[in-house]
Amino acid sequence: MKKVRIGVLGGYRGSSMINYCKRADNAEIVAICDKLPEVLEAQRQRAEGLNIAFYDNFDDFIQHDMDAVVLANYANEHVPFAIKAMKRGLHVFSEVLPCQTMKEAVELIETVEETGLVYAYGENYCYMPAPFEMKRLYQQGKIGEFEYGECEYIHNCAPIWHSITYGERDHWRNNMYSTFYCTHSLGPIIHATGLRPVSVTGFEGTKNERNLCGGAKGGQFGMEMVTLENGGIIKSIHGNLYKNSVWYSMYGAKGRMESAREDAQNGGVKRIYVNCDEYAGEYVKKDPESYEPTYDVLADTKGYGHGGSDFYSMYFFVEKILGRKDADTIDVYEAMDMFLPGMFAYRSILNGGIPMEIPNLRDKAVREQWRNDTACTDPKVAGDMLLPTFSKGTPDIDDGVYAHMKQLWDTECESGEGNYRSSAFHQGAKK
Ligand SMILES: NC(=O)c1ccc[n+]([C@@H]2O[C@H](COP(=O)([O-])OP(=O)(O)OC[C@H]3O[C@@H](n4cnc5c(N)ncnc54)[C@H](O)[C@@H]3O)[C@@H](O)[C@H]2O)c1
């Protein structure tokens, strides 16, 4: 079987995709790029005798003889790298989020269209067992047409903030606004229904103590109330509330289904509950079904993160490259359907909570209005359209907060007792 030759940018989260390529029948890892020498060194030590080239520079990395790249670099910097890679003829798998400005969204879509390459958005939560089954049932018409849904991705990162921001004041996680990281919650319902979001109203968590003491400058959590093209409504919530929860619920014209509510670290959302009638309007008392679904493609997903979903997002990407038309990937338009509600929810918040229309970037004429829109919270990209990270203004955080986070991070690396990155990884990296 032909193996797709893959290079991975970003050696932290990228470890998951590297591991996929090491174990997979349909792919192999041929190159790894990270600007941090200790990250490259740790990956070198794990190379297991494989023929992998290591790069500390993206421009050199994309010269490597390969078919596709995985972008597991900073969440707000995927587009420039995606465009460069596609212009070199490489297929792209992008970690979350797909872009950070409307200008980037337009450029990304146009590059995918021009090159005709596979672009897959790595919203792995769509591939957790319960949401994946919810999509299958919805597409079969099991609950009828979508009317209302709720989705949650609550991850209290306060205890691990130093391990994921390293005390860097301008780390993307410290600069993101409350509704930015929205696709773990919204993604699975968008993917299940295939419906396009048309408008959104945003809300921002303002009790910010847990955020501020780690150096995060955005609102503690974000909420979107999204209207879909068929009039259906989604309530989406994500961020830094105190107890973790990943949960999806959908109501249709014939019934409802929901996943079990799981802690984010419990290895994915597995159990599903379904309660629906045979026909719309029928109302007979029936016991709801409850089960743990299995996938059509039975794979050994042990060791893959996020309940095995990290396996499936990569598996379908590679299958798509190999020409399997029905491979269940998330294309660039759907990636925007998952992301733009969060971006425009923040514009709603900054405008006092008014509903905002979500542009339909499938329409080429609509793109013209957004082609030069660089509004975001990243000073490197926004130019004169820089947004505050919080609706009441970007908080002024003392240098001491970041110094403290850096000290915690350094201590964690030295002790090898990290709670997010594996301790072995860092001990290896320090040698
Ligand atoms: N889907 C999920 O469940 C999930 C979970 C965690 C992280 N993520 C995503 O993974 C991505 C990476 O997050 P992370 O947690 O690894 O932390 P991170 O964003 O702090 O690290 C990114 C890595 O990329 C490297 N990098 C960044 N820019 C580079 C460049 N120009 N050249 C070479 N190397 C570069 C950094 O050195 C670092 O090792 C983000 O997009 C994040 O949203 C997704």
Image (tube, grey):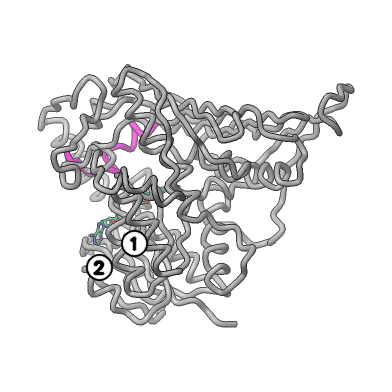
Residue 414 sits above or below residue 273 on the image: below
For marks 2 and 1, the one nearer the N-term is: 2
- Outermost residue, left side: 399
Q: Specify start and end residues of the magenta stretch as a single range.
A: 156-170
Q: Nearer the viewer, residue 246 or 141?
A: 141
Please name the amino acid that badge 1 sits on. Ala
- Image location of residue 247, percent across then percent down: 57, 32
Magenta region includes residue 284: no
Q: Residue 424 occupies which quadrant of the picture?
A: bottom left
Please name the amino acid that badge 2 sits on. Phe
Residue at which label 1 appears: 82
Crowding at dot 2, Cα within 10 Å, few <14 / some 14-19 / many 20+, comes out as some
Q: Nearer the viewer, residue 400 or 377?
A: 377
Residue at which label 2 appears: 58
User: Mark 2 near ligand 1 (CB under 8 Å)?
Assistant: yes
Q: Nearer the viewer, residue 290 or 280?
A: 280
Magenta region includes residue 167: yes
Residue 100 visible in image: no
Residue 336 sits above or below residue 296 on the image: above
Crowding at dot 1, Cα within 10 Å, few <14 / some 14-19 / many 20+, comes out as many
Answer left or right for 300 relative to 344.
right
**Residue at horizontal 25%, vertical 72%?**
55
Residue 385 visible in image: yes
